[in-house]
Image: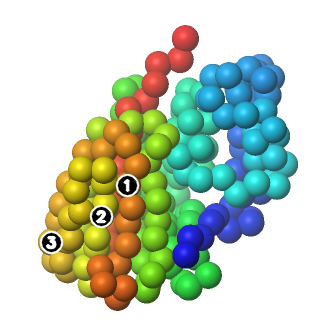
Amino acid sequence: MSGGMRPAVVEQLGERIRAARQELDLSVGALAELSEVSRRMLTQIELGQANPSVAILDRIAAGLGTTFAALMGVGASDAPEGVEIWSSENGSWAVLLDAVDTETLSVETWKWKLLGVDVYEGGGGIPLPGLMHHVIEGALEIETAEAVEVIEAGGSGRVASGGSYRYRAHQGQAAVFFSVAMLARPARG
């Protein structure tokens, strides 16, 4: 089972993307070309009519010369509870807690809860120099093209992934964990 962003988050994100695009004086077509996301999808996202993946939002953010976290408005001045970005019908969720941007790198801190058979599929957007994980309850299973890794409660692990990856609770139980994603910031030219 997969989930998606909450409707209020989708609407707010669409407004922020449109404002950032207009501030840069970019047309929808120009942003589509920069981000490699179709004009139709961009229009639907800006109108709050699409529920895009984080990978697509990463590409749009890169096209705008920013990061997903910055588009979400997450930074040093935000409340510690963060912004719930992803959820499922079964009660799984992912919260973006904080982000720090430098000229060349964006670092995001996330808290996750995966229940039962829920699977989160990530990657496929911009390359990630690394993902670090620390499991606080249960066991997390991380699947990449290269391997499947299981991290037990109290354990930590690192995944370097230029491709897609999947998170799931090991053996269909529950898993609660933190992740830190490091994303290279593209140069705007």
Q: Which amino acid is tagged 1?
A: Tyr
Q: Secondary structure at mark 3?
A: loop
Residue highlighted by disc 1: 165
Q: Which amino acid is tagged 2?
A: Ile
Residue 45 placement, left or right of 82 = right
Asked if one can make out residue 43 in the rendered structure from this viewpoint, the answer is: yes
Q: Position of residue 75 (x, y in %)?
A: 49, 49
Question: Which residue is at a point 31% across and 54% down the rendered structure image?
Answer: 144
Asked if one can make out residue 20 in the rendered structure from this viewpoint, the answer is: no
Disc 2 residue crowd, few under 14, some 14–19, many 20+, Cα 10 Å: many
Label 2 and label 3: CA atoms lie apart by 13 Å
Of the numbered discs in the image, which one, if any, rests on residue 114? none
- Is residue 92 placed above or below 39 in the rendered structure? below
Of the numbered discs in the image, which one, if any, rests on residue 155? 3
Label 1 and label 2: CA atoms lie apart by 7 Å
Task: Check contact, mark 1 vs mark 2: CB within 8 A.
Answer: yes
Foreground disc of the pair 3, 1: 1
- Quarter occupied by the C terminus: top right
Of the pair 125 and 71, the residue shown nearer to us: 125
Question: Which residue is at a point 74% across and 20% down the rendered structure image?
Answer: 30
Q: Position of residue 121 (x, y in %)?
A: 47, 59
Q: Secondary structure at mark 1?
A: strand
Residue highlighted by disc 2: 142
